[in-house]
Image: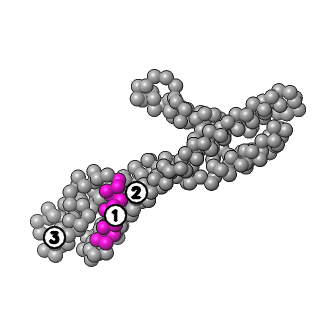
Amino acid sequence: MRYLSLAALKVAFADLFGERHAALLLSGAGKTYEPILLAKKQQIDALPGALTGGKPLAEAIAEADDVHDGFGAAIWHMTEAYGRWPKAPAHVRAAIERVRAAFIPELDDLRASYVEEAHAAFQHRKQIEALKADLQLIPIAEGQTLLDWAEGYAAAAEQIGALLSQRADADTDARRDAGRIRTATLAVLGRFRGALGDEVAANPALPRDLDAQVFALFDQLNQMRADALAGKKASAGEPGAPETP
């Protein structure tokens, strides 16, 4: 079970103390280890969501950046289209120029770092309010206006900022504590599994598949992670088995 992440352990423990709780208590080993395992579950549940929420923060930040860049590109291309309109009324052209200058003067601005995009969100919020009339002047599909795109653009940058803050929190002592909790939890699970195996071997009254009944999800999640790591190594052309995360 060495490939189990904290997120996987959180899911597997929820299953163990839910659907599989009865199987856990069938054996003397299960009864002995139940409070120990419950304490580990509670420790993991108490960790910051950034460490146990499942989706890696880097992936969540990248997704928020995709949304941010999508809105930014859409705004830029809309202003580009109006700028090329040869018969654009003067007041519309002036509004478009103000919007472009405020939000995305150049398409290459979308290459900015996450920190720069998050910082720009504060200024963009002020500009949305100041240029509200200009933004509402430009219609887009679904009954919306350029104001809706500007709101989405700023909101995505704000989300990037919030996620960066979560990552900073996760990089403090909480991450070190989480690593220790994970290591200790895997050790407890290993000792419990060994004791359960010995008891099943010595007691024919216990189900022969009791180990599988108790550890099925742990094993499934562990294998999924191992396969994913092996797949990444294969794609990168790296030899050997996946390393322990």
Which circle, 1 or 3, is nearer the viewer? Answer: 1
Specify which label sits upstream in the sequence, 1 or 2.
1
Which residues make up the magenta segment?
Answer: 114-128
Q: Are the two marked residues, 1 and 2, in contact with CB atoms closer than 8 angstroms?
A: yes
Left or right relative to 186: residue 74: left
Q: Nearer the viewer, residue 180 or 121?
A: 180
Specify which label sits upstream in the sequence, 1 or 3.
3
Q: CA distance from mark 1 to mark 3?
A: 25 Å
Which three-letter amino acid code belongs to the residue tagged 2?
A: Ile
Q: Residue at x 44, y 47 (%)?
A: 59
Q: Which residue is mark 2?
A: 160
Q: Relative to 84, is 132 above or below? A: below
Q: Quadrant of residue 32?
A: top right
Q: Which residue is mark 1?
A: 121
Give x and y (percent) for residue 150: 32, 66
Which three-letter amino acid code belongs to the residue tagged 3?
A: Arg
Q: Which residue is mark 3?
A: 93
